[in-house]
C-alpha cells in the first residue's frame, strides 16, 4: 500500500482535521500567490486585470474539464484504499494518469487553435484583447502540468496523505512569487510575464509530485501495465456529473462575464478582484471539500456508516465556523482589501459592492461545497451536479431581470441568490438521498 493514512480509524473530527488542515493550508498558499499575482498585475492598471480575468475564464473551463478524471479517480482510489484492494488501486492509478494526459493535451491544443475567437467573444477594446490573447496562449502550456498537479493532490489525499501536496504547493507558491516581479517588471513582459511565471512554477511542482509519488510505483503502477477498459469507464461515469456541473458553471460564468463587459473594463476588473478576495472562503472550504470526500470515501469502502455521518457533521461545523469569519471581513472591511489591488475609484466601488452582496451568502456556499464533497465520497456525484446545474442556470435570467433596475449590482445579486439556493437544497437532499438512503442500505446488508 502506498504511504498514507488510514482514515477508518480514530476520532472523526481529529482525523478529518489532520487530513483537511494541510489541504486548507495548501489552498491558502495558492490564494496567497493569487493575491500577490493580482497585486503585481494590478500595478499595470485595470485593463491588465481585465485581460487576465478574461483569459482566466477559459483556464477555469479547463480545470472544470479536468474534474472528469480528478473526481472519478479520487472516488475509486479512495474506495479501493479503504477496502485495502491493492490491485484495484494500481489499476485506477494507471488509468487516471493516461486519462488525465489525453485531456490535458487535448484542451491545450484547443485553446491554441481557437485563441482569437475565444477572446473576441467578449468584445473588449483591441489593446485589452491583445493582452488577453498573449496571456491565454502562454497559459495553455501551463495547463498540462497544472492538470497533473491537481490530480496528484487529489490522489495523495485519497491515500490519506495531504502533507505532501502542502509541501509541493509551498515550493510552487514561493517560486511563483519570486518569478512574478522578475518576469512582469524586470523583463518588462507585462501580463505575459505573469503567465510565464505560472508555467515555470507548475512544471517544477509536477516534477516534485512525480518524485514523491515514487512510493506508489513498486506496489501499484509497475504491476499493472494493461488496465481494464472498465477502469476508464468507471472514472468517467463518476466524474461526468460533477464535470458537467463545473463546465456549465464556467460557461455560465463566461456568459455572465459577457454581460459584465457591457459595463466596461472596470467592471471586469472589479469582478476579478472580487473573486480573488472571495477565494478566502472557497479555496479553503475547497480543501475541506477534498478532505471530506477522501474521509467519507475510505469509510464508505470500509462500510463504517457511523463514521460517515459524524465526519459530515464535523466538516459542516468547521466550514460554518471559518466562513463566519470571512463573511464578517467581506461585509465590514471590503474597501481596504480592494484598495490593496487597485486604486481606480470606479473599480474600487464596483468591487466593494460585489463583496458586500456576495458576503451575505458565504455560509450557504460553504455548506454546498462540503456537502458536494460528502456526495463525492459516497460515489453519488449526480445529486450535486443536478442541483448546481439547475440553480447556476438561473443566474442569467435573474441578472437580466435585475440589471434594468439596479445595474451591475443585478449581476452580483444573481450570484448571491443562486448560491444561497444551492447551499440550502444541497444540504436537504444529502440528508434524504445521502445519509438516510445509504444508512438504510447498510442496515439491509
Image (cartoon, rainbow, N blue to C red):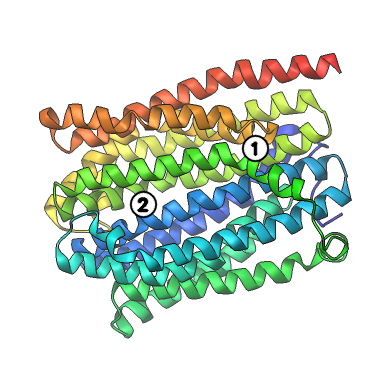
Return the mark for residue 276: 2
If the image is split into quadrants, where does the N terminus sit? bottom right
- For residue 115, which quarter of the picture? bottom left
- Which residue occupies 80% across, 51% down? 228
CA–CA distance between discs 2 and 1?
24 Å
Q: Element at badge 2?
A: helix
* Nearest the eye: 124 or 99: 99
> Is 98 placed left or right of 334 in the picture?
right
- Which residue occupies 17% across, 69% down? 127
If the image is split into quadrants, where does the C terminus sit? top right
The percent coordinates of residue 351 (x first, y second) are: 23, 46
The percent coordinates of residue 410 (x first, y second) are: 20, 32
For label 1, the crowd category at 10 Å Cα-Cα, with few meaning under 14, some 14 to 19 and many 20 or more, is: many
The percent coordinates of residue 145 (x first, y second) are: 56, 67
Q: Is residue 414 visible?
A: yes
- Which residue occupies 42% across, 47% down? 279
> Is 407 placed left or right of 303 in the picture?
left
Return the mark for residue 292: 1
Mark 2–mark 1 CB contact (< 8 Å): no
> Is 79 placed left or right of 121 in the picture?
right
* Nearest the eye: 434 or 270: 434
Amino acid at each position: 500500500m502506498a504511504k498514507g493514512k488510514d482514515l477508518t480509524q480514530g476520532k472523526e473530527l481529529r482525523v478529518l482535521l489532520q487530513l483537511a488542515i494541510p489541504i486548507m493550508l495548501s489552498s491558502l498558499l495558492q490564494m496567497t500567490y493569487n493575491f500577490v499575482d493580482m497585486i503585481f498585475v494590478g500595478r499595470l492598471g485595470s485593463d491588465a486585470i481585465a485581460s487576465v480575468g478574461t483569459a482566466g475564464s477559459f483556464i477555469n473551463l479547463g480545470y472544470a474539464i479536468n474534474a472528469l478524471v480528478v473526481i472519478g479517480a479520487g472516488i475509486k482510489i479512495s474506495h479501493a484504499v479503504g477496502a485495502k484492494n491493492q490491485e484495484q488501486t494500481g489499476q485506477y492509478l494507471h488509468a487516471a494518469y493516461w486519462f488525465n494526459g489525453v485531456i490535458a493535451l487535448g484542451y491545450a491544443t484547443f485553446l491554441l487553435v481557437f485563441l482569437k475567437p475565444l477572446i473576441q467573444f467578449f468584445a473588449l477594446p483591441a489593446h485589452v484583447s491583445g493582452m488577453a490573447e498573449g496571456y491565454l496562449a502562454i497559459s495553455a502550456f501551463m495547463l498540462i502540468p497544472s492538470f497533473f498537479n491537481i490530480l496528484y493532490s487529489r490522489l495523495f489525499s485519497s491515500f490519506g496523505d495531504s502533507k505532501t501536496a502542502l509541501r509541493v504547493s509551498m515550493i510552487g507558491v514561493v517560486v511563483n512569487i519570486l518569478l512574478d516581479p522578475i518576469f512582469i517588471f524586470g523583463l518588462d513582459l507585462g501580463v505575459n510575464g505573469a503567465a510565464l511565471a505560472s508555467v515555470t512554477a507548475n512544471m517544477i511542482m509536477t516534477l516534485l509530485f512525480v518524485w514523491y509519488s515514487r512510493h506508489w510505483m513498486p506496489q501499484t503502477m509497475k504491476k499493472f501495465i494493461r488496465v481494464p477498459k472498465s477502469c476508464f469507464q468507471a472514472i468517467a461515469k463518476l466524474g461526468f456529473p460533477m464535470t458537467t456541473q463545473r463546465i456549465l458553471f464556467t460557461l455560465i460564468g463566461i456568459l455572465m462575464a459577457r454581460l459584465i463587459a457591457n459595463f466596461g473594463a472596470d467592471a471586469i476588473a472589479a469582478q476579478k478582484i472580487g473573486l480573488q478576495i472571495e477565494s478566502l472562503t472557497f479555496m479553503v472550504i475547497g480543501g475541506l471539500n477534498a478532505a471530506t470526500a477522501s474521509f467519507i470515501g475510505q469509510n464508505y469502502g470500509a462500510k463504517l456508516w457511523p463514521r460517515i455521518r459524524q465526519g459530515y457533521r464535523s466538516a459542516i461545523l468547521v466550514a460554518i465556523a471559518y466562513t463566519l469569519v470571512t463573511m464578517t471581513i467581506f461585509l465590514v472591511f471590503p474597501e481596504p482589501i480592494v484598495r490593496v489591488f487597485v486604486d481606480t475609484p470606479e473599480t474600487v466601488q464596483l468591487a466593494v459592492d460585489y463583496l458586500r452582496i456576495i458576503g451575505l451568502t458565504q455560509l450557504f456556499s460553504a455548506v454546498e461545497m462540503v456537502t458536494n464533497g460528502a456526495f463525492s465520497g459516497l460515489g453519488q456525484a449526480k445529486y450535486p451536479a443536478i442541483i448546481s446545474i439547475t440553480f447556476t442556470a438561473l443566474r442569467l435570467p435573474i441578472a437580466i431581470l435585475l440589471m434594468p433596475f439596479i445595474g451591475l449590482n443585478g449581476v452580483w445579486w444573481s450570484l448571491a441568490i443562486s448560491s444561497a439556493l444551492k447551499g440550502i437544497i444541497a444540504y436537504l437532499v444529502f440528508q434524504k438521498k445521502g445519509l438516510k438512503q445509504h444508512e438504510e442500505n447498510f442496515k439491509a446488508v
